[in-house]
Amino acid sequence: MKKTLIAAGALALAASVLSISPANADATGSANVGSGSLLRSEFRQLVSGGGFYYDTWGASTCTTGTSNQDYGKSSMPEGNWSDVVSFIRDLNSCDVKIFQDTGYNVALTGYVNYGTTGRTVDDGLNNRTSSYYLS
Ligand SMILES: [Ca+2]
Ligand SMILES: [Ca+2]
């Protein structure tokens, strides 16, 4: 029984260290995804809002409300962007919902309006995003 508890504790510690220091926090470049002339969202590599960007483009503004998705990206291989997002801004009526894993698995937030100026992601969510929806 005691051994089991120690093992569980070690596993929990390892998991918390992994979430603080993901294996892949460095993008290799900036990326543009989606199509159209309207910028819908911009992710940045650094908590300061600097570094490489990952921009999502669309042909129209996002629709009112968040009951439908206006865009979804189930993985972010462009520029090695999985587990890189530190700062988010959204434009043209879009809000952003980020997920920890590819395929929209493990939601990290509901839809958030980060605004056109943008801001750093909430505590504990740095360098974790691997898929996202815009609505
Ligand atoms: Ca980052
Ligand atoms: Ca992730």
Image: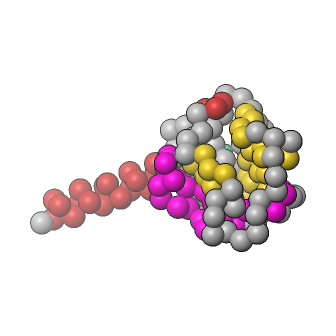
Q: Quarter holding the N terminus?
A: bottom left
Q: Does the magenta stretch include residue 100?
A: yes
The image shows residue 6 at horizontal and vertical percentages of: 23, 60
The image shows residue 80 at horizontal and vertical percentages of: 61, 32
Residue 76: quarter of image = top right
57 vs 88, nearest the viewer: 57
Residue occupying image coordinates x 71% and y 38%: 33
109 vs 33, nearest the viewer: 33
Residue 94: quarter of image = bottom right
Asked whether residue 108 is in view, the answer is: yes
Residue occupying image coordinates x 55% and y 37%: 24
Q: Is residue 103 magenta?
A: yes
Q: Is residue 14 above or below residue 4?
A: above
Q: Quarter holding the C terminus?
A: bottom right
Residue 122: quarter of image = bottom right
The image shows residue 85 at horizontal and vertical percentages of: 66, 47
On screen, residue 130 versus residue 4, left or right, reads right
Q: Is residue 111 above or below residue 37?
A: below
Asked whether residue 55 is in view, the answer is: no
Residue occupying image coordinates x 40% and y 53%: 15
Q: What's the magenta region?
A: 91-112
Q: Is residue 59 above or below residue 122?
A: above
57 vs 41, nearest the viewer: 57
